[in-house]
């Protein structure tokens, strides 16, 4: 990752591998770096290279990357994604947590905060996002992890608002956004990248004052 404003190859939460403005130039300032955390069922910690084998298993399920690619990730693609997340955290002071199930100790996906460089029209911004293996779906784990990310975003990082961008057809992710208190702002067109076409999306937002009211 480079200095502020430098053009660099990135792999965002969306999975796009494209030339974009460096996330540091597109990110609101933060009060303090993101730290690891625990929820009732999840061990959420910063990505590291040692996560590759377990994350590759998660990403090998076609359902995980159905949106936006309709196929699983190869090990090479997973490695590129992981290394970029590690570097982005070093550059920005926050990023995606690897989500490990506390009961089993297994990696079951990721959740956390990223800069949505794939949607330049809303920058600067920070997005909450997640991907979990299919066996973890329907158990409230995405909502649990996303709530932890929002709490850190509004307290530790001191952000004024957080967004989330879903594909219009991805009803599961939209439902998670609603469960964690985000409001649907509008429909959006997500620009095409080098490895997918233009997408119809939905933009959700949550302001810190609203989150505080919901949490008390």
Image (tube, grey):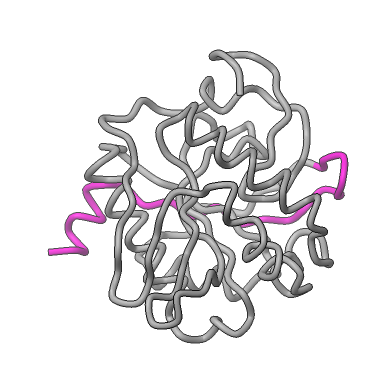
Give how far across and how far down residue 93 sits, in percent: 40, 32
Where is the N terminus found, in terms of image quarters? top right
Q: Is residue 64 left or right of residue 183?
A: right
Name the residue located 48 percent from the left edge and 30 percent from the top edge. 90
In this view, which residue lies farthest toward the front? 50
Give how far across and how far down residue 47 sits, in percent: 51, 49
Give how far across and how far down residue 116 sits, in percent: 58, 40
Count of numbered tags: 0
The part of the chain drawn in magenta is: 192-216
User: Considering depth in this image, is 58 or 149 the residue closer to the camera?
Assistant: 58
User: Considering depth in this image, is 128 or 42 the residue closer to the camera?
Assistant: 42
Q: Is residue 111 above or below residue 193?
A: below
Q: Is residue 188 left or right of residue 40?
A: right
Say which quarter of the image contains residue 17: top right
Q: Is residue 7 left or right of residue 165?
A: right
Q: Is residue 160 left or right of residue 201?
A: left
Q: Is residue 198 magenta?
A: yes
User: Considering depth in this image, is 174 or 73 the residue closer to the camera?
Assistant: 73
Name the residue located 31 percent from the left edge and 38 percent from the top edge. 159
Name the residue located 22 percent from the left edge and 45 percent from the top edge. 155
Q: Is residue 12 magenta?
A: no
Name the residue located 39 percent from the left edge and 60 percent from the top edge. 44
Say which quarter of the image contains residue 134: bottom right
Q: Is residue 69 above or below residue 83?
A: below
């Amino acid at each position: 990752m480079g200095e502020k404003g430098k053009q660099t190859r990135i792999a965002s939460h969306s999975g796009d591998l494209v030339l974009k403005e460096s996330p540091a130039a597109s990110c609101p300032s933060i009060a303090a770096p993101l730290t690891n955390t625990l929820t009732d069922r999840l061990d959420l910690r910063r990505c590291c290279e040692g996560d590759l084998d377990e994350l590759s298993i998660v990403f090998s399920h076609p359902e995980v990357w159905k949106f936006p690619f309709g196929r699983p990730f190869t090990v090479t693609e997973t490695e590129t994604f992981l290394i970029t997340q590690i570097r982005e955290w070093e550059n920005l002071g926050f990023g995606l947590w690897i989500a490990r199930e506390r009961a089993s100790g297994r990696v079951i996906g990721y959740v956390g905060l990223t800069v949505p460089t794939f949607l330049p029209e809303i920058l600067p911004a920070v997005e909450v996002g997640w991907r979990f293996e299919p066996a973890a779906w329907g158990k409230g784990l995405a909502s649990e992890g996303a709530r932890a990310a929002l709490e850190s975003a509004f307290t530790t990082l001191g952000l004024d608002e957080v967004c989330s961008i879903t594909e219009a057809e991805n009803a599961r992710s939209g439902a998670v956004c609603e469960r964690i208190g985000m409001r649907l702002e509008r429909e959006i067109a997500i620009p095409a990248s080098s490895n997918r076409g233009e997408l119809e999306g939905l933009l959700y937002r949550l302001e810190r004052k609203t989150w505080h009211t919901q949490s008390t």
